[in-house]
Image (cartoon, rainbow, N blue to C red):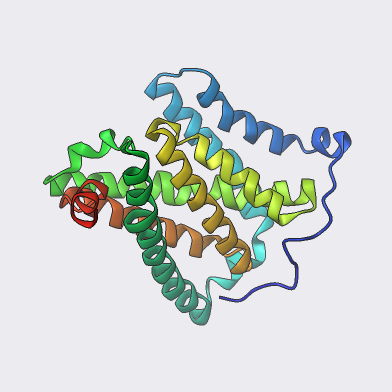
Amino acid sequence: MSGTNNTLSTPFSLSSKSIFSNWPLAVSLSLVLLPVITPLSAYTGLWLFILHILFCSFFVFKNQLVKRKQILRFTYLNHTFFNGLLAGLVLWVILGLILNPVLNHFTGIMTNYNKFNVLRHNIPLTLQATAGMWLSAAIGEEIIFRGFLLDRLTQLTNHRGVAVAISSVLFALIHIYQGTNGVVTTFVAGVLFGLLYLRSDRNLFLLILAHGIADTLFFASVCFNYDSTFLISRLF
């Protein structure tokens, strides 16, 4: 993956004028935080999320015209596909096989993955859930949190490290239903996704593929009962 000449240690700067003049960022932050601070029905939350994806997509793909032209090149597609698969596998190992089981063991509290228990030993439902995940989490979340928020926060703060941290906190907040360990794991995931996005010269398609592969492996591990619960009982 190719990098850029910019570093994470550019001078930090922030002004009220820059905040209020960046109205798309304010709208996006509101759409992220509203479901966190206000209880919403599943139906309302779903349509709010879809609206957020569409809103961010307009700005993301408008600003990535060059990237859209690049994806027509075989070398670009080949590079993206290979690195996306590799990154997804590595992220799943780090987060799903190491970090989350270790957190669960040493805190004595299991990450709240109860909503995924319906996938256990149910291959047809797992396949349906995986398809939905690619549309919502892999594509939707990457467009919102890396393609839009990370770029906008970088422009606002003039510091990529701060932007990665803030976008990762926001990414973790929407997974608060998973409990403390889930929030920590998702925050680390956000940091890794953010660094990968910057390191790959903002290759959003690579991020979508990596996110989708990591979550697909997670769904498969739940389906075949090889998730954190299984690992803890055997590793510790």
| Quarter residue 97 falls in | bottom left
The picture places residue 28, in percent across and down from the top left corner, at 63, 35
Q: Say which of 57 and 163 sits in front.
A: 163
> What's the residue at 40%, 30% (across, down)?
177
Q: Is residue 160 above or below residue 24?
A: below
Q: Say which of 104 and 14 sits in front.
A: 104
Give left or right: position of 214 versus 224: right
> What's the residue at 34%, 54% (across, down)?
96
Give left or right: position of 8 versus 141: right
> What's the residue at 50%, 60% (across, down)?
207
> What's the residue at 70%, 33% (across, down)?
26
Q: Say which of 65 and 36 sits in front.
A: 36
The picture places residue 213, in percent across and down from the top left corner, at 36, 60
Q: Is residue 75 above or below residue 35?
A: below
Looking at this rendering, what residue extends furthest in the bottom direction? 75
The picture places residue 107, in percent across and down from the top left corner, at 37, 40
The mark total stands at 0
Give left or right: position of 152 versus 84: right
Looking at this rendering, what residue extends furthest in the left direction? 121
Give left or right: position of 63 versus 102: right
The picture places residue 47, in percent across and down from the top left corner, at 45, 29
Q: Is residue 54 visible?
A: no
| Quarter residue 9 falls in | bottom right
Q: Is residue 94 visible?
A: yes
Which part of the image, by quadrant, shows the N terminus?
A: bottom right
